[in-house]
Amino acid sequence: MRKNRIPGVDPAYLEKQRAMLLRKNRHVLYFNDSEMAAIDEYCSRFKVHAKSVLFREAIMNKILTELEENHPTLF
């Protein structure tokens, strides 16, 4: 007799997705004192605990917006 299996997501697919999202490239940023003071003020005012998330989201938002606005055209 065949058991009724509930259809779900393939575990191999999930593992592949996790591997694609793994961050293995590193980049270092340097800020001057006034930039760092502004970042610290922002983080304390808006209760940001993970600065790396803030930087990553801000950078990727800027990059993706620029790429979308300046996509190649045919004419």
Image (spheres, helix red, strand yellow):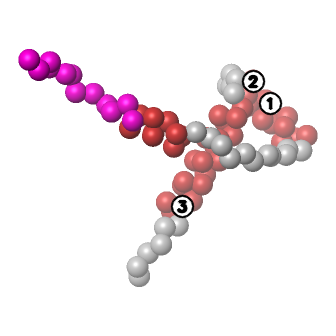
Q: Which residue is mark 3?
A: 67
Disc 2 residue crowd, few under 14, some 14–19, many 20+, Cα 10 Å: few
Query: What amino acid is labelled 1 in the image?
Result: Asp
In this rendering, is residue 48 above or below 28? above
| Left or right: 18, with 41 as reference point | left
Where residue 10 sits, quadrant-wise, is top left
Across and down, in percent, residue 28 comes to 79, 46
Whole-percent x and y of residue 44? 75, 23
Query: Which amino acid type is shown beneath numbered disc 2?
Result: Ser
Q: Is residue 9 above or below residue 32?
A: above
Q: Nearer the viewer, residue 56 or 23?
A: 23
Q: Is residue 25 left or right of residue 18?
A: right
Q: Are marks 1 and 2 in contact (CB under 8 Å)?
A: yes
Foreground pick, 15 / 22: 15
Q: Is residue 61 above or below residue 12?
A: below
Q: Disc 2 designates what residue?
A: 44
- Reading the image, the residue beneath label 1 is 40
Q: Residue at x 49, y 60 (%)?
A: 68
Q: Is residue 8 left or right of residue 27?
A: left
- Provide residue 39's location: percent of width, then percent of height: 78, 35
Q: Residue at x 41, y 82 (%)?
A: 75
Amino acid carrying label 3: it is Leu
